[in-house]
Amino acid sequence: MHTEITAGTAIHVATETGTLKRLLIHSPDRGLGKVVPSKAQDWLFEDIVHLDTMRRGEYDYYVKLLLYFLDPDKIKGKLAEIDNDPTRSFFIPGSENYFDSNCVVDIQKLLGEILENSEVRVKLTAAICGIERCSYNTQEELNQYDPHELAKIFISGSYSDKRMLFAPLPNLIFMRDIGIVINDHILLNKPAKNARTRESILAQFVFFYHPMFGKIKDSIIEIPENERHFLLPDDEKASDYHRCTLEGGDVMMVAPNHLVIGCSERTSLYAAQQVMKLLFEKHVVSKITIVKIPKKRDYMHIDTIFTQVKKNVWVLLGSLARLGDEAKKQDLLHFFGPQDTNKEFRILQFIKDDERNPTEIENLEDLLTSISVQDLGVTEPVRFIYSGDNEFPYGEREQWTDSCNLLALKDGVVVGYDRNDKTLDAFRKHGYQVISAKDLIQKLEDDELSVETLTDTFITLPSAELSRARGGSHCMSMPILRVSAP
């Protein structure tokens, strides 16, 4: 039976696969339709997208699916009406027909609500206009807009009449990157790219001013910059040892006592060190594992190379997973060659109060096995499902289109893209049923299937346009409440 979650419910995420009860999302907005080829790379997109297809043909299925799992009263019995509405008003925050769920929450809705407060509106407008170098007259003009329309402008960078004011925020659909819930704390990000600076400011205001988070203000963690960062030469500021950047795709709350942080193209060693220091001081976790991965666009964050499917099941990229084993097979020339003191892939595990004596873990499978067995108490065998069924060249091809980036709705039930055929075959070999979001939604509507009884299932989303944006269902969610099975 569905339980209503009120605005005062505490946030809590202690695992990656506990039953999802509340999350933040952001539906594709009008700004995505304004990404031009010459700026796509600067705005962190691989290609321009067809907005209407991304919305109607792809992301809307994601929202409907989330509602059936988390807040079915908002959608049950309305499916035909929703599908036949050419305006998509059901999906648009601020519209009369908006689904307005307390469980599936669009950050644009929260932003519009805090902008109803005139003091917050003036502060946030000044902050946004400052970083976007707007004129004073523009700032005054923006303060006159309806709060929900102003929220759209801040996110999309454009007015309703299609005039552009500043750059869009196409990456805001990847909500996980703005922050991560660690037990009962929220860790806010520090984006690596200038294109995401405005996202970070909007997130700060939402978390500090919205009543949904009013009871946990003291539990919001912001990572401090290097206190002398403004004195560093520009080349040193970019150094991994001085740069303070962190994004949510590199942070996984895998067990109540255990956090995994990736050091990647987007998250620096310095930031990981600061997070570890803060979390240990606040007694939030007792174990932190740092996974250093190659700084390549192919990988971007650790959740592009592995995610958890079930307490004892993981999906991962085979070519990176077995690097520890490959080291045992090195040829004679390697031993007489120069020693690599800064390996691209390395795993170190730190225990609170003994941080100076980390344990090095040889490969990814060993780390994930230890999480399942030691941290989560799994007694059945730990299983690995590989991207592209570990078949060349499909492992890398399908990892590029987010075969490893899955969101668990509950233990063993995950959402991913439909285009990764070999990976889906691998799931079938491991006993998982594969069903399209469209078919599952209809079966849930017709009471042919039940969310409560669904087990070991991979739900596929259409993904021709979403996959161009380089992020999957894990990236597109920020879980803020999960309930673990006893």
Image (cartoon, helix red, strand yellow):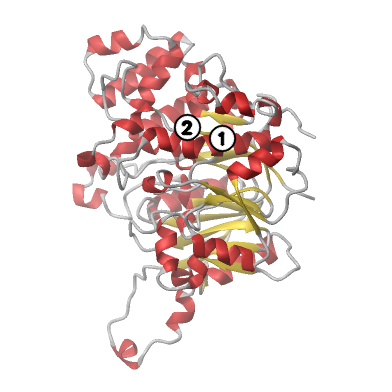
Which quadrant of the view contains residue 7? top right
Q: Earlier in the sequence, mark 2 or mark 1?
A: 2
Q: Secondary structure at mark 2?
A: loop
Is residue 1 rendered to the left or right of residue 306? right
Image coordinates of residue 96 in percent, x first then y, are 55, 13
Above-or-below relation of 117 to 273: above
The residue sitting at 73% across, 43% down in the picture is 451
Q: Residue at x 73, y 36 (%)?
A: 446
Specify whether 183 is left or right of 166.
right
| Mark 2 vs mark 1, CA separation in Å | 8 Å
Task: Name the residue beneath numbered marker 1.
Answer: 63
Which is more toward the observer, 14 or 442? 442
Using the rendered image of the protein, determine whether residue 441 is visible from the camera's viewpoint: yes
Instruction: Examine the rendered structure and indicate whether residue 106 appears above or below residue 481.
Output: above
Q: Residue 236 in the image: x percent, y percent?
A: 23, 52
Residue 344 image offset from top left, x and y in percent: 36, 68
Residue that extends furthest to the top in the rendered view of this protein: 144
**Mark 2 vs 1: CB contact within 8 A:** yes
Q: Which residue is mark 2?
A: 27
Label 1, residues with CA under 10 Å away: few <14, some 14-19, many ≥20: some
For this rendering, which residue is in front, 362 or 415?
A: 415
In the image, which disc is placed on residue 212? none
- Res 33 → quadrant: top left
